[in-house]
Amino acid sequence: MKSNVHEPYGEVARQQSCAWLDDVAPILSSAALTFLGLLLEIVLAKQLGIAPRSRTMLVFVTGMSVLPVVTMTLQDWLDRRSPEAGRLLEAANVWCAVAALASLALVAIVGWAGKGGMEFWRKAALHVAEVSTVGYIVLITWLRFAVRTEGFLDRAGAIIARWSSRPTQTLALAFAFAAAVITLFRIEPENRYFTPVLSFLFPTAPGGFPDLPSLLLATLTAALLVAGGAGFLILERRLAVDHPARLQSAQRAALAVALVASVVLSFDFSLAADAFHYMTVIGPALHLLHGGTLMVDTFSQYGPGPVLATYLAFRLGPPSFAVANLAIQLCNLTFYGLFLIALWQSTRTRITAVWFGLIFILFWLSSWDNGQGNVNAAPSVLGARYLPILLMAVALGARRGSRHSALTLFAGFLSSLWSIEAFVGSAALYAGSLTPINLRDLNYTRLMRDFAIAALPMIAGLAVLSIGTLAAAGSWPAFNIYLGFLSSYNPLSQFWSVPFDAAFWGWMPIMAAVTITIAGCWRLTIDGRSASRQILNDTWLQHALPAAILTALTGAYYAGRSVDFTVAIALLPFGLLFVPAALWLAGRALGGDRVAVRLTAVTVATVFWASIFCCLYVLRVDSPYTLLLQECRDHDRCSPAALARSLSETVNRELALNSRNSLWSLDDYDRTIVADAKGLIERFSGKATKVTVLLGESSDGWQMLSDIALMYTDKWHTWPRSFTFSDELVPALFKRILAEDVTLASGDLVLVRRDVAGLGQLERAILERLRTQGALCELRGSTPDVAAYRIRKTGDPQAADDCREQTMDLAEEIVERSRGRTADLAALIDGIRAVSRALPDGALNYPALERAGATVPPNLVAGRRLVSFSGTMSLQKSGSQLTIDLFALPQAACRQLLPPISQLAGVERLAVTGTLADEKSVPISQAQAELLCAQNTRQLRIIANLKERSSSE
């Protein structure tokens, strides 16, 4: 009797599940086949010897565009021709993908538990890819011949109905994918807790962060955040039935509150800035302030938009990193607001959507640099780069039955003025939203007309930029020079891109979301005129497709860089896909759908995990951010007046002269040079607005010290320079700067770094030209590192001032700096030697050293990463041998350091490359150092012995 009572309900629930799964299953089949196709591409690329950079982009581009379209077309064609054969292909795709995902997850576990390390993972994972793709091809070939057998499809259909129902397939694929993401998130054989997905919950050292109270507080807060979202969802569902008008008012109010909250909660009062990255916009903005013309002699690889934003900030406040940070934060805060608006547009449960949108913003803030970085410390990671593209996505979502609107036209116009990335991205979103609708309707004439309308504002923007530049400067914009940056900054260049190392797979959910969305939209395009579907409708083309394209565009940065945490750039666009889908599933789960309940459990666990992470890292006491919470909790600045005073004090500080706080900041020696140059300019330049300053590279090898020194004196270069580092990247720009007819008058000030080996090509060329114009007469008051000169042109009488020829002995200064640097390296080697038995073989990072209790000098740590006095540093342990690689090492530092480092206890060999044949036995004389460092490889390899030294040593 009991089963009779419950059978109708169970049958109804089963039919409801099958109803939406009938729409979802072909898309999941396409996604599964796309995954298998990616494995095949990896195998073929490896066999064909395709370069790693090209291989990465091949997988990325095809995985997010070509493969979903091809696989969805195949599945849909087979479903129409033979539903039974289509169902068989669907089952084969899903179960082969499940087997491949499970096998990869198992390989990761075995690699962690065994001693093979990364090498085992790479070989075994490639073998799994080979077996999976070959096995799938064999299976499909066999099925192709088997279907010709009479009755085969009927027998196969019976087996599938019993053992491979669509609910079973969907859950198997979802859970296999979730398991693969957890195990493959990042392959770290040396991680005691297996994966970063779990290890962030445990302290890296006894008594370290996170401690138990912090973890409990973060867990409780995360639980409240998730519970709050569930409460809002239930409330909205009830209001939708009982009080629909009240619900609309509440949703509009929720959006307004969320927009204010996104500003109040995420504004960073620290105004942190990485000098190198910020100079890409600060330098051109300063050039504009001092008479330069944008797109004529003033360029940035990020385009004119971010430069103009920084320029306007400098018109309102003193030129500094802090003021530039405010301009970039304004772009980021606008991006957050548009993100919330796009979420609000794309779902019916809008209050819940913006609630989880705020959680996504906090997660984005905390995830940068694995919880150790500040997203506002670099200008190029969000708003200043992608703001017009997101505006286009919002504009497309705001359309109500029309193809175009004033907002879409404005977004297109703005993108053409902003940057080449914004132009291409907005065009991709606009065209991507128009193409499927017209292809579905078979209206090719309308498609061409829509393209023409969409192109008009973009062409108008370029015309306004060109005519405005011609009117202001009498010259057309030098688009060829601006586009010349693409030769250096592109995913295939040796200069910018980083080959994928097969260790980080945390990008899988982002690619899966894009793949599923593209497949779904393409199915709507080729089959959209058939019977109505429950989940595939114009909403996908209006909201999901632009979000997917935006996710792919932002994810392209990671595909080029392959630096794991940069995948976070695509996190907020990914949220535009994840949140609406998760809320749709949760709604079905509340209605009793059993499959949706299980899938919702996965999404709830994901959001709960992300909430714990962001509560732990972005709100901790030593967070890289100073948000409103930290200002009030840690500094007792809770009132608006106190916050304003704190912000004003920070704006007026010279952040570049403060102590080093990240990998990219200036070190003590660089700050000394900048401070010396600033003092000399203020003392000797008088009312001159332009000064010739040639300070060369920073300790990590970036040509930028001259630009920073001039920023602090409110003056600029005599030659038309914007940012020395990037000016040297484009040959046409380099030639244009040197072709400028600049002739100094006798008595003009010239500042030159005494160690001229640190000058780059541009500054060396300028110095050589100055020497042809006359003599450089040194002024009294020059410092040990920076010489101040007045030029005396050939034939001019000598001025009666304090100018005199002077030379200074820098040997003592150089020895002192070398002594401190070698002492840090000696302490590092001794600290590792003391705990070498507790350290595994393989790559060593700072957390691994910290867990083992190794002593690491503070000067060799920045942002919980190992660094040196020049740049990044990597360690590799093999038995009793330790290999230390220093990167971005200036040539001058190489010559200074090789002899003293070669005499450190335990050091056995040195090399200026990573090649075994180039290693030299120690000690190394100064003459040998000069010869080796002349190669200027910017690398130093140190091979040390970790065996305990005898008492006689």
Image (tube, rainbow, N blue to C red):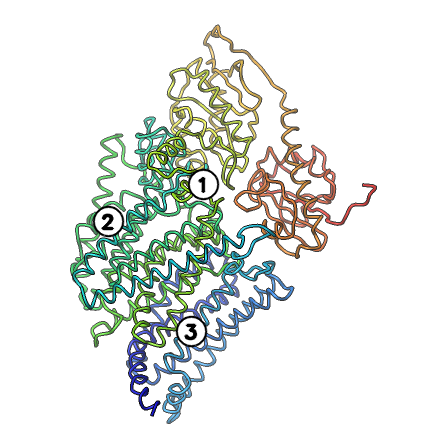
Which element is circle 1 on?
helix
The residues tagged by marks 1 and 3 sit, at their Cα atoms, a distance apart of 46 Å
Mark 3 belongs to which amino acid? Answer: Leu
* Camera-side mark, 1 or 2: 1
Residue under circle 2? 412
- Mark 3 Cα within 10 Å, few/some/many (few <14, many 20+)? many
Q: Is residue 916 above or below residue 379?
A: below
- Mark 1 Cα within 10 Å, few/some/many (few <14, many 20+)? few
Residue under circle 1? 634
Q: Residue at x 53, y 20 (%)?
A: 787
Q: Is residue 552 left or right of residue 621?
A: left
The disc label shown at residue 661, or none: none
Q: Is residue 669 above or below residue 541?
A: above
The disc label shown at residue 173, or none: 3
Name the spot of residue 782 as percent of width and height, x first. 54, 18
> Residue 879 is drawn in which quadrant?
bottom right
Q: Residue furthest right?
A: 952
Name the spot of residue 412 as percent of width and height, x first. 24, 49
Mark 1 belongs to which amino acid? Answer: Asp
The reply to whether callout 1 and callout 2 are in contact (CB within 8 Å) is no
Name the spot of residue 802 as percent of width and height, x first. 51, 9
Which element is circle 3 on?
helix
Q: Is residue 689 left or right of residue 808?
A: left
The residues tagged by marks 2 and 3 sit, at their Cα atoms, a distance apart of 39 Å
Mark nearer the N terminus (2 vs 3): 3
Mark 2 belongs to which amino acid? Answer: Gly
The residues tagged by marks 1 and 2 sit, at their Cα atoms, a distance apart of 44 Å
Mark nearer the N terminus (1 vs 2): 2
Name the spot of residue 918 as percent of width and height, x first. 67, 46
Mark nearer the N terminus (1 vs 3): 3
